[in-house]
Image (cartoon, grey):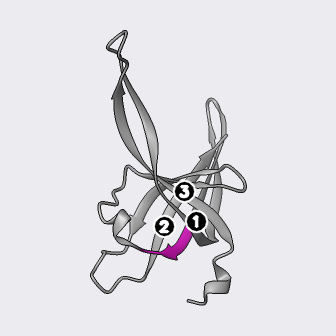
Amino acid sequence: MRIGRLRERIKLEKPITTKNQTTGELTNRYATVARRQAAILPIKGGEIDTSGGELVRATIEITFRYDSSMQDLAHDWQIVDMRTGRVYDIDDFEPITSATRFLTIKCVNRSK
């Protein structure tokens, strides 16, 4: 892949659970693992009419340079497009090997 095609800025975030020191309440949130230049390509999209309104589902392919900070990448992580603020749920990704330089992830963006 040519480096010039990596035009978008993304954040890879993993879920973490934190405990409030005063109340003891557990809170789920996301922590940023890495920021990368990426190529974001739409694959397909569609609309579903639900009882609560229309739901738009878009499948996106995101390609970026891989490094060891992302070695425990999982399906519960999310990717945030820093320009638009869209949040993508990870749907599928290629197996990570020692020779991986670029990683391609298929993601889903759901919005109402």
Q: Position of residue 93 (x, y in %)?
A: 39, 69
Give the mark toward the camera: 3 or 1: 3
Tell me the residue that label 1 is attached to: 60
Disc 1 crowd, CA 10 A, few/some/many (<14, 14-19, 20+): many
Q: Residue at x 60, y 70 (%)?
A: 37
Residue at point 41%, 51% (across, down): 77
Inter-mark Cα distance, 2 to 3? 15 Å
Q: Secondary structure at mark 1?
A: strand
Mark 3 element type = strand
Q: Residue at x 35, y 16 (%)?
A: 21
User: Marks 3/1: CA distance?
Assistant: 15 Å
In this figure, which residue is indicated by the disc labeled 2?
A: 106
From the image, give the main secondary structure of the stretch colored magenta: strand
Q: Secondary structure at mark 2?
A: strand
Percent x, y of residue 44: 62, 67
Q: Is residue 72 above or below residue 52?
A: below
Residue placed furthest toward the front: 21
Find out whether the residues at labels 2 and 1 contact each other: C-beta distance under 8 Å.
yes
The amino acid sitting under disc 2 is: Lys
Residue 2, compared with residue 8, is above or below; it is: below
User: Which callout, 2 or 3, points to the residue nearer the camera?
Assistant: 3
Instruction: Pick out the residue farthest to the bottom.
Output: 2
The disc, 3 or 1, on the residue closer to the chain's N-terminal end is 3
Q: Quadrant of the N terminus?
A: bottom right
Mark 3 belongs to which amino acid?
Lys
Residue shown at 63%/77% (left/top)?
6
Amino acid beneath label 1: Ile
Which numbered tag is attached to residue 11? 3
Q: Which residues are magenta?
A: 61-66
If you read the primary sequence from the N terminus, does the residue marked by circle 2 or circle 1 appear first?
Answer: 1
Q: Position of residue 3 (x, y in %)?
A: 61, 85
